[in-house]
Image: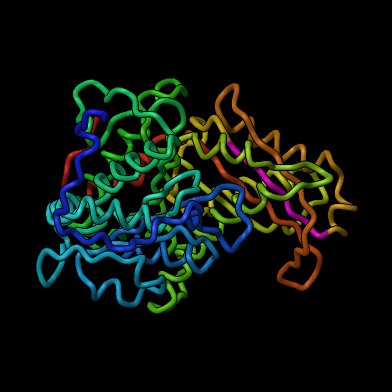
Amino acid sequence: MAKKTEKDEPMMDLGIEIPNIPMPEQAEESDEIEDECDAAYRFAFIGAGQAGARMAETFWKTGYRRVCAINTTMKDLVHIDIPEDRKLVMEIDEDGAGKDPAKGEMAAKKYYEDIYDLMRRSFGSKFDRIMVLAGAGGGTGTGTTETMIKIAHDIAQSFRLEQRGQAPQGQQQATTASVVGTPAVGVLVSLPMVSEGQKVNANAIGLLESLFTMVGKDGGKLAGRSISPLIIADNERIDKIYPKRSVSQFYGVANQSIVGLFHLFNSIATKASELTTFDQADFGTVLGSGVLTFGACPIAKWDSPTDISYAIRDNLRKNVLVADLDLDRAATAACIFVGHPEVLDAIPQRNLEHGFEMLSRTMQDKSIVHRGIYRGNVIDANGKPGLVVYTLIGELGRPDTRMDEMYRVAGIAPKK
């Protein structure tokens, strides 16, 4: 007879009933989110504060679906028309952050993981670039922006959209660390009006100086750049361009102007043209070029080359973003003509070429102008076939004139 071993001993019954638990299925539901608009790049947007949430709402209404918003009080989010599960209230006190950025910053740090989860849930697993949307001047938008940028970098790096570099000397790794290559995080910030007073303009200056550090450049080369693009919308400027808009219309018009131009370039970059194509790679190059400004202008006359070049200059003067940017510092641009087929069949090619060349001359040496010429159903104000020019200019640096005005209103000596 064989000797018994430990393996032959009966197992001890511990009296535990093993429930019949269904095992997870192999195929998992995809968390990919699809935009409901033509888009070359899959942007993800998070808006903070009243201004940022309004911009996020406008992107949602345009058809972008990777959208969410945060605030320190529900009363400022309740009228934002995006799904409720895309909103986060960071409760700090009954009145929210008010005009105190320190409260906004405290709330963002307290709710860091909640914001992270909101963004992951709202953006899904497939996107190309995160845009942080905020108003410079208030408490929530101003105070939370740097933390939102940090969270956006964390998410971008978790999806390997970018790689963190070394923080610039003397700066904190937590908020201003550079990234290797082109950043996958950008910022769209709106400036307050002069009439909003000293405190609001001082808040805006503090945020802008920080953002300019993050988007800084040296001789046209990336140097510690951790965000791009940086798009600066100026409510003071918009008020001058649309002086007759009512109180209820103003912010809607302002946001639609900014979002509409942003989307136009992202949409056109999906379209092929039998004339000249502005493609996704062209758009990506400009997106990575720091401070940007957009412009759009109908061209009333196109009989001579100078008609076109004048229209482009007028386009740049009447942009809805911050004014007085120095185009001599610009190194990258896109210039797109969209015309009615009848117009493009009649206008000489050299007239459009003159416009492209004028833009190149205005910019710094060795600059690049990405071109596009498209047919479209363009009708002018008189109901006749028309022509429109759209511009996107990058590597612009600080808007010194506007910044000096803000320093003056805030009662602060400008930085040298």
Indicate the position of residue 311 as horizontal and vertical percent values.
67, 50
Image point 21% across, 32% down: which residue?
4
Q: Kindly tell me whether residue 14 is visible in this rendering.
A: yes
Q: Give the quarter of the figure containing the C terminus.
A: top left
Per the rendered image, the range of residues in magenta is: 333-340
Coloration mode: rainbow
- Residue 80 higher or lower than 111, as above or below: below
Q: Quadrant of residue 151?
A: top left
Direction from residue 345 to residue 309 in the image, left or right: left
Asked if one can make out residue 410 in the rendered structure from this viewpoint, the answer is no
Residue at point 68%, 49% (across, down)? 270
Residue 107 in the image: state x and y as whole percent.
16, 56
Whether residue 72 sits left or right of residue 255 in the image: it is left
Residue drawn at (59%, 33%), measured in percent from left and top?
Answer: 362
Q: Residue furthest right?
A: 345
Where on the picture, by quarter, is residue 400? top left
Relative depth, front residue between 232 and 346 = 232
- Residue at the far left in the pictured view: 93
Residue at image position (35%, 54%) is 119
Q: Nearer the viewer, residue 65 or 302?
A: 65
- Closer to the camera, 325 or 101? 101
36 horizontally vs 231: left or right: right
Residue 367 among those drawn in magenta:
no
Above/below status of 220 relative to 127? above
* Secondary structure that dominates the magenta span: strand
Name the foreground residue: 220 vs 9: 9
Location of residue 331 in the rendering, given as x and y in whole percent from the top left corner: 54, 29
Q: Quadrant of the N terminus?
A: top left
